[in-house]
Amino acid sequence: MPQLKEDYSPRGNRARELFLQGYNCCQAVLLAFNDMTGLDDKSAARVASGFGGGIGMLRDVCGTFTGACMALGLIEGYDQPKANEIKKELFAQIREFAKRFANDNGSYVCRELRSADAPMQNVNPSDQGEISRRKRPCPELCAYSAQLLETLLLEQAGNHA
């Protein structure tokens, strides 16, 4: 798990704060990149709304990971079906994000990251957010994911300079 710390990047701190305000983990990370994605807050929050808790509280792929992938797709992705080179680069970036995320956190699967938490599938969605916000590591994972994506984007920009 990421260590609790105060020195995340401003974007990482924003993702953590958004989560603590009540956005789910996926929303928090995606919203932290709205200045780069072109989405307004309402659209970003709505498109990411079903991906919290490991996709609809199924505890599959971590919502912070999913939010970062959404942001990366909006920033670096493609919109043409035959954009093979861009697709190849995007998937390589996602694999690199996954490698670093899993290396630092042990997994990118929600149930594994939150193995000490009570099962969430049968929790009322209106209660789930408050339960989740009280548990670690979710706020830290929001900050971590936003900062990691920011780092990868800066590295990528440096490679193209």
Image (cartoon, helix red, strand yellow):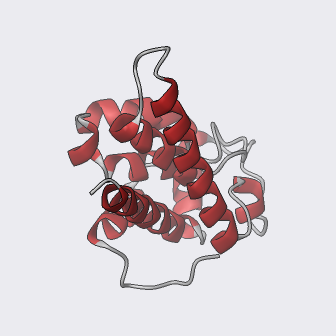
Q: Residue at x 73, y 69 (%)?
A: 106
- Residue 78 percent coordinates (x, y): 41, 26
Q: Residue at x 77, y 69 (%)?
A: 116
Q: Is residue 123 visible?
A: yes
- Residue 23 percent coordinates (x, y): 41, 49
- Residue 98 percent coordinates (x, y): 63, 55
- Residue 82 percent coordinates (x, y): 49, 15
Q: Which residue is more in the foreground, 16 or 151?
A: 151
User: In the rendered image, which quarter contains the C terminus?
Assistant: bottom left
In the depicted structure, whether residue 46 falls above or below residue 11: above
Q: Which residue is more in the foreground, 50 or 70?
A: 70
Q: Quadrant of residue 52?
A: top right
The residue most toward the top is: 81
Q: Is residue 127 visible?
A: no
How many badges with numbers are in the image? 0
User: In the rendered image, which quarter contains the N terminus?
Assistant: bottom right
Left or right: 154, with 118 as reference point = left
Q: Which residue is more in the foreground, 99 or 117?
A: 99
Q: Which residue is more in the foreground, 135 or 154?
A: 154
Left or right: 17, with 69 as reference point = left
In the depicted structure, whether residue 138 falls above or below residue 66: below
Q: Quadrant of residue 97?
A: bottom right
Q: Residue at x 66, y 42 (%)?
A: 57
Q: Residue at x 56, y 51 (%)?
A: 65
Left or right: 106, with 48 as reference point = right
In the depicted structure, whether residue 98 falls above or below residue 6: above
